[in-house]
Image (cartoon, grey):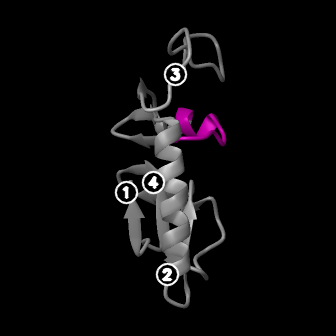
Amino acid sequence: MAAGRSGTVEAVSGGLRGGSSLRIPMSFDDFVALGETKHHEWYDGTCIVNPPSRRHAVAAMKLARLLEDHCPEGLTAIAEWGWSTASGLFEPDIMVIAIDAPDVTVLESVAPVLIVE
């Protein structure tokens, strides 16, 4: 966090374009304090923001549909959801998970069957 400014991270001026990446060193507690945002992950003491390009977003959407259509019974394809490990919080483009996986924002105890990044 910026000194003296609780809840504020001064990172860059200007916009972050799809397909580019922004890395902001911060503690895990500061990362959690950001709340729900899109296209961000945390590992190695760094918040990484990776907004997709339009081309990437379209490809991910089409692949998620194909995966969903071909998932065995009991599995589902899901986009833009989180997965945590001992080393960080990740938001892969697509995960194939058990339909009965815990209904939480971030999976902590159940590993995905497939991760697409």
Q: CA distance from mark 4 to mark 1?
A: 16 Å
Q: Under tag 4, what secondary structure? A: loop
> According to the image, label 3 marks what residue?
16
Tell me the amino acid under the disc marked 2. Answer: His
Q: CA distance from mark 2 to mark 3?
A: 35 Å
Mark nearer the viewer, 2 or 1: 2
**Residue 14 % position (x, y):** 55, 10
**Residue 56 % position (x, y):** 46, 44
Tell me the amino acid under the disc marked 3. Answer: Leu
Tell me the amino acid under the disc marked 1. Answer: Ala
Left or right side of 88 for 13: right
Crowding around mark 1 (Cα neighbors within 10 Å: few <14, some 14 to 19, many 20+) is: few
> According to the image, label 4 marks what residue?
92
- When the figure is inspected, residue 47 is found, relative to residue 90, above or below; the finding is above
The quadrant the N terminus occupies is: top right
Q: Under tag 1, what secondary structure? A: loop
> According to the image, label 2 marks what residue?
70
- The residue shown at (49%, 81%) is 70
Q: Please state the extent of the stretch shown in magenta in the rendering.
A: 30-40
The mark nearer the N terminus, 2 or 3, is 3
The mark nearer the N terminus, 4 or 2, is 2
Q: CA distance from mark 4 to mark 2?
A: 19 Å
Mark nearer the viewer, 1 or 3: 3
Mark nearer the viewer, 2 or 3: 2
